[in-house]
Structure formats: C-alpha cells, structure tokens
Image: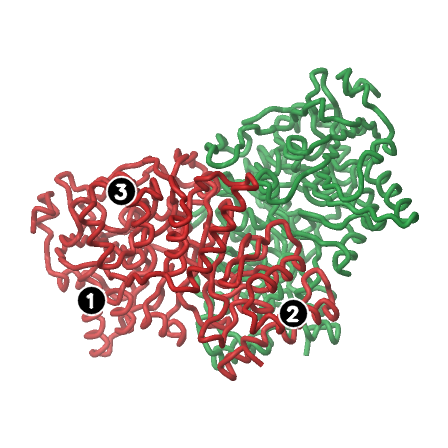
Chain colours: A red, B green
Amino acid sequence: MSNRIAHAGLAAKRMTAEQAAALIGPGMAVGMSGFTGAGYPKAIPLALAHRITAAHDRGEPFALRILTGASTAPELDGALARAGGIDFRLPYQSDPDLRARINQGEIEYMDIHLGHVAQYTWFGFLGKLDVAVVEVSAILPDGQLVPSTSVGNNKTWLDLADKVIIEVNQRQPRGLEGMHDIYYGTALPPQRVPIPLTQPGDRIGEPYLRCDPDKVIAVVETDAPDRLGAFAPPDETSRRIADHLVEFFRHEIRAGRLHEKLLPLQSGVGNVANAVLAGLREAGFRGLTAFTEVIQDGMLELIGDGTIEVASASSFALSPGGVDDFVRNIDRYREKIVLRPQEISNHAELIRRLGVIGMNGMVEADLYGNVNSTHVAGTSIINGIGGSGDFARNGFLSCFLTPSTAKNGAISAIVPMVSHVDHTEHDVAVIVTEQGLADLRGLSPKQRARKVIENCAHPDYRPMLEDYFDRACRHSKGKHTPHLLGEALSWHERYLETGTMRV
Amino acid sequence: MSNRIAHAGLAAKRMTAEQAAALIGPGMAVGMSGFTGAGYPKAIPLALAHRITAAHDRGEPFALRILTGASTAPELDGALARAGGIDFRLPYQSDPDLRARINQGEIEYMDIHLGHVAQYTWFGFLGKLDVAVVEVSAILPDGQLVPSTSVGNNKTWLDLADKVIIEVNQRQPRGLEGMHDIYYGTALPPQRVPIPLTQPGDRIGEPYLRCDPDKVIAVVETDAPDRLGAFAPPDETSRRIADHLVEFFRHEIRAGRLHEKLLPLQSGVGNVANAVLAGLREAGFRGLTAFTEVIQDGMLELIGDGTIEVASASSFALSPGGVDDFVRNIDRYREKIVLRPQEISNHAELIRRLGVIGMNGMVEADLYGNVNSTHVAGTSIINGIGGSGDFARNGFLSCFLTPSTAKNGAISAIVPMVSHVDHTEHDVAVIVTEQGLADLRGLSPKQRARKVIENCAHPDYRPMLEDYFDRACRHSKGKHTPHLLGEALSWHERYLETGTMRV
C-alpha cells in the first residue's frame, strides 16, 4: 500500500485514523475535501465522530466548524452531524441527518456560492482555518499530492490551514494522475491578473497539489469507495423537460443565436440533467463541450461517445456502473476531462468569457421569473445554492428546470411569489417544466408572467395562477410587478397547513 | 459651430431635430445615449415626442422600444413617456413621468443589470436595433466620434443599429477628447479572450467611437447642458452612515484584510454616497482608486485633492458647480479619469479581478440579508437595479447603505422579509444604516438576523423585529431561515393600508 506514499518524510507520519482524529480539537475550523460525494476523507471524520461522542459522553463540549468543497457523504456530514459535532457548516450539503439538524436550528449553516468559497477564505472573511483534511490518490516523491476524484477547495485548504492531515485512498484509480489542472496563478487583489483560459479544455496549471510537508501532521491510508449514486434512465417527465430544452437550442441555432456546437454546457446533478444530456445526444448534437462542476454518468457517456469533446469540472458523481466504465477507460477519459479547483470551475471571469449555458434544477419559480433553489416553504433548507448562481449570473444563458409539480401534485413549482429567492428576476432567462419552456429574455415582469403561466404551469394550477395574476393586475398598488401582498405567500401557507397548495 | 463636425460627408447630413425625428417610425427599437442624466440626446427625443403626439392626435398608433445606457432626463424619458411614445423601456430610469406610467401598467419596463445590456444585445436576446441616437461632443475628420459626458452603451448601439443619428452638442467641453477609453476587444463567445485590464486607470482601447458613416442618416447640432443635479452637503444621517463604513474600513485595515489604499471603490449616486466619499477624505485616506459607474461631485472633489488618484467610470452626474470645476480643470481631470463603455465599467471579469468594494444604496433589507433595491412594497418600481448587482455579486465586498427609516419614520428599512429581492442573502456582505453596521460575512441566516436587528434597525422598530424573529424561531416550520409566512410581508401591507409600518 505504501507505494502510494513515495515521500519518506510523509510516510513516516503514517498513523491510524483514530490517532489522526485525536489531533483535531474542540472549536477548530476544519477544511475537508469532498464535492458531490467524491474525494471526501473516508476514515478521519468517522473517527472524529467517535471522539466527539466520547467527549460528549464525558460531558465535554466538542463541536467543529466544517468547510468542504460541496456535499460529502454519510461518513462525513452524516456521522459528524449525528454526533452533534458540527456547530457551523458551509458551503453546500445534502446529507439527511445534517439537513435535519440545520432545519431544527441546531447547526448554523451558511449557503454560499461555490465559486466564492476559496476567495472569501483567502480574504479572511470566513475566519482562520486550523486543519485541512484532504483525500488524495497518491503522494509523489517530492511531496506533491495527486488529487482524488474531486478537487473542490483542496488547494485553498492546503495553502491556508495551519496543519494538514492527508488521507491516501488506494481505492482511487492511480490513473487519475494527470487529469487535474491546479491553477496557482490566483492572487489577492490588487495583484490579480487575467486567468489565461479561453477554451473549456485548456490546461493552465499543474497536475498536482502543492503541500508543505512540514505542515502535515498525519497521513492516514484508506481503501474505500466514494459515495456512489444511483443512475436510473430518465423518466417521462425528465424526458419531456429535456425535449423542450433541446428544441429551444435548435430554435436558437436556426435564429443564428447559437452555433451548432452550442457553447460550453454547465449541467446540474440529477435525473433531469441526465435527461437533457441524453436528449442532446439523441438529437444528434456532436462536438459539444462542458464547463461544469460535476461529471455524472450522463455526461461520462457523452464524453465516451464523442457527443462531448472535452469536459471541465471539479468532481465526479458516478454510479457503480459509471465508476467501472471510468476506471476501465481512464486513459481515454484523461484526454477529455480536466478536473479543476472549484474556484476555477465556477469562476465569474471564465463563465462570462466562455459564455457558459447554465442548466440547473430548482424548487420553484414565480410569475416574474424569480427562482428558489434552496428552501421548502421559505424556511427549510434542502441542499444549497451550489454553483447555480455562479453560472446563472455570469453565463450566456441561465436555464432553470423542474417538473411542474411535486409531491404527487400537492406542490406547484410555479407560484405567485417564491418563498425564498436565490436567483432574481434579473438572472433567469429560461424556465422549463415538462409542460413547456418560457423564454423570458427581453421581457418585462408582466410579459414574463403570461409566458410562465401559459408555458410552464401544470394545468391543475394554471387557472389559479391566472386568477391571481388577473386580480393582481387589477388591485396591485404598483402595476410594474403586480402582487397581492396578503396572498402572495398563501400557497405555501396552505401547503404547510393542509398538505397541498390546491384550494 | 460646424468646427465640431470635421467630416465632410457627415457635415452634409446635418438637418434639424424635426427632420431627424421624422426618420424614426412607429414600432422601431431605438438605442439612445445617456447615463445618469449625462450625454443623452437633447433635441431629437423632444422632436420625436411632438411627432408622436401629432400622430396620436390623428388617431395613429406610435410607440417605440427605448434602450439607453441608464437614466436620462425629462427631455428624453419624460417627454416620450408623457407623449405615450414608449411601449418598452430598458435598462434603468429615474424620470417621474416615465416611472408613473410604468407603475400604472402602461409601459413595459425590463430592469436588467447595466453590465449585461451590451452583451445581451450582441447575443440577440433583446431584439433588433433599428436606430441609434447618440450624443457626441465632436466628429473628427475621419468620421470617428468624440464621445460626450457618458459612454454607456453607445459603442454597442453604433455597432449594431441599422441606422445612426448623431447629435453633436457643442455645449459639451471640447476637452473631453482623450478622456474616453473605448475597448474594441469584446467578442461573442467562443471567441472571447481575457480583457487586458489590471488596474482601474489602465487604458486598453481607443479614445473615440467608431461609426460607419454610411449608416448615419442624420446629424443634428445642439447646444444644451446635461441634466444637472443638486449637490447638498451631507446631512447628519448620511454622515453617520459614512462614519460607520469608514470605521469598518479602518477595522479591516487593522485586521490585515484591507490595504491602507483600500481597493477600487464603486459608489452609487446620491447624498449617502457623497457622504461616504467625504468621510474617507476626512479620515485621511489618500491614494485611493475608483472603478465605478458614475462620477458625481463628491468623487470629483476627491480626485481634485488627490484623495482618489484615478477613477474609472462610464458617466458623470454633476451639479452646476461640479460642471464649472470640471470644465475649468478638465486638462488635469483628463489625467485621472477614464470613461468607459458600461459593458467594461460593470464587467464581471474586471470587478472580480480588481476586487472592487461596492457601496450602493437600497430600499430595504431583511433579517437574513436579502436586499430590495428597486421596489416599493413589492410592486412599484422606483428606478432599477442599475449596476448594483454587477458589483455586489462579483466584487470584493458588497455594502448596502440606507437610513434606517423613511417617510418620517413610517417605513423601516429593516423588515422581516423584503417585498422584492434584487440581491440575495448570498450576495450581501455589509449593511449600514445611521444606527450602525452589520458585518454579515461568514454568518448563517440566524446569526445575520441578530446582527441586523441589533446594529441596523431603528430603535422604534427593533422590538417589533425582535418579536418577529423570536416567534419565527419558535414557530417556523424550518429553522434554517425562520419565518412566519402569514406575517412576513405584513409590514408592507400595513404600510399600504395605514400609511405606516408601525402597529
């Protein structure tokens, strides 16, 4: 196993996860690796959870500030949350136990753009970082680190943390080496210069993470898989959403506003995103590119068959079958995939320059094109904004996709007023449900409302929305953005009270 | 007068404003110059309003799509709105007559980030542009145009409109020549390259606007001043807001998070903005820079006395006294001021790279740091988002400033839930009122709420906010962002019903 640790000084720091966890104390701020369930530390968080539980059993307080790349896994967020070991968490999470504790008001959670985390840490806005706990796939003889299946904020954690703990996971394919591109040209303003990337596949950095060996206080060997997701073929609703979007792209090509190779795609995670990718392939698109955060099965397939020529991301989120394919063909994929720090994958400068087409899921949209990506009924967080805002604000086109209803029709994804705003009316260009697509570009609020109701709302809710909008147009004090303030959030209230938004 | 029109072919196209207005027909999309009341066409819009009124008197429909840089003046937005001659308008306005018609539902208005207008026009998202009507200060022998007191979207209008009408305003100082920097390196993706600007004062383009003389269908000579604003010394409330922000900057310098020269400043328009600039001078700051949209009197003074070394903007907004000073010292100011297209002054890539400190006014903020910059009680537009979103999202620090109450205390600027969201909780770092400053960086929603209530709310409203927040923390379904949905917008309802937010 030790052939993965080729630096003698670091090899000498090998210890058990329990020994390493003992180096992390109460109140510390810990920057952990991990992004969409890939590349997170597998052993130390579990050992830490045991240590925390033991402390609590002794009546001693023990909680940590946990910063990551994005979501992790039950062995990290879940274990630490169940142990009561997190008092503050950022920037994105998807673990049920962690989420429950956040929504019970027990854990403070800051939901921050994924593209802002690294620079805010460098600016000193997020406080001091005591320890970095980072999974890698190998340590080179000179002490440089071969990253794992995600890059996330690892460069920043390694650079800024006082101390570093490394997990070397021999389960990660050795063939990952050379797939990463770690850009070391960032700086604090006013010393910043242009980032020299003009195509999604450009390599502008180094394949390895630098790390001062003197800061490393522990090296732990692991042999465990990433959290693997399920990958189901797209259902009928997702297919219809995808069809509307693909037809829109064709329309834009005919109108001369898009090239046949489109522009670099950013695609969120999940069934709808996979359906869109499959739809592009079925529609005969070729030679596409991706400048995105996550490569999931749907995208891997398109890279494999040439629909997508090159993909830039910060992480993988694969099913067991996807992992098999990836490992089997890793030498081929390495030519077509670039894994970057999320500071770069989600960088405003690059998203704007490349003209990325952002395609993200959402919880709900309102008549005027405001989008809620994060909250149920305005108060309970689901996961977080992730990178959707990085792409929606600065890209070429911001598309938000969702089935028109949820909970067997009890919830309408189109509402009079969203209960929480993550993307404002100024940042939303296209809304798609299985009912249809609303192209909101160049429209005033009232023009948008008519399109959203007509094209996107479920027929069961359309008359209710039309009624609200008509009455708002008549009785609203101001008629730029007509609303009945006493009724604007009543659909959410009704859902909380009766279990459905229907009257 | 014709020494301002040195190109023979264009001189031959001179005509009256009435003749030029006759070239603009019903239904056309017209891109006009003008940004914060500077550099807008002075004669043609008035002539056009007469032409439209005459058509309406004959029972003929006549309305236009009007696109500008930002706000203009009564002779443009006011005259055309009163004539019923606008059916669609973007991206920012401040004229009382235009605003009234928008809020009566008579004019469709799209409120769009100032930094997005040019690229969206190039993308084809805002439709075809029939005519550009652009004020310049002179036409050179080779047909290039010396820009006027604002640049705005003029480059884009001149490049993309089918036809061009030029107003040459001899009232604008001839000494403006050389102050502008028109960047011609933009492109459509995927052809975009880095914008080579690394300091606010960098000149990366040309001093003149290019214009194909064959597209020019009219040249009209004018001799009229820009809309001049008032400049009052800061009042006590503005001073206190400024003092809190200046003290915060000092604190950040002590903490090592800011250099003594700070970072490039972006400053909104108005009394509070002027107070902040005056506060910086009084506090002894020197060698500052600005990367902003508008230069108003407060900033001109600081440039004059060396507090600000160099300022980049897209426009002026000066008082009569400010204009006198500017004209008298124009050769000195030309060394320290760069006027750019708003696509560049508000560019995501540059705002992010330079690390701009954004300081903008707002209407209201809520407990969780969401900011409303545009609407009264959720439905009536005031002016528009302007560039505040460009800076809040992509800058180093986004600060929002406002007195804690309005309308003699009838309105609290801190509310349970904002009635319209222009800047989400993810994009707001600092909120300042005359009561104090809430530093929201690195905080969860509930942590933010406590700071906003304690530091920013007016004492008359603080107990009401505490009461709401306490009850929300107890009774909210989700406790990540505690809200009582039935009550969240009740302050605005009460204001509409009773004239005050007080119970």
Q: Nearer the viewer, mark 1 or mark 2?
A: 2
Chain letter behind tag 1:
A
**Are tags 2 and 3 found on a single chain?**
yes
Residue named by callout 3 = A180
Between residue B148 and residue B230, name the one nearer to us: B148
Q: Can see residue A393? A: no
> Residue at position x 18%, y 48% from top?
A328
Element at label 1: helix
Between residue B64 and residue B245, name the one nearer to us: B64
Q: Can see residue B190? A: yes
Instruction: Give how far apart the Cα atoms at labels 1 and 3 are.
Output: 27 Å
Element at label 3: loop
Chain letter behind tag 2:
A
Residue named by callout 2 = A466
Q: Nearer the viewer, mark 1 or mark 3?
A: 3
> Residue at position x 43%, y 57% from top?
A112
Q: Earlier in the sequence, mark 1 or mark 2?
A: 1
Tag 2: amino acid: Glu
The quarter of the rendered structure image containing the N terminus of chain B is top right
Residue named by callout 1 = A46
Q: Residues within 10 Å of mark 1 (few under 14, many from 20)?
A: many
Tag 1: amino acid: Leu
- The picture places residue B495, in percent across and down from the top left corner, at 71, 72
Element at label 2: helix
- The picture places residue A394, in percent across and down from the top left corner, at 50, 46
Judged left or right of residue B135, residue B483 is left
Tag 3: amino acid: His
Instruction: Give how far apart the Cα atoms at labels 2 and 3 are.
Output: 51 Å
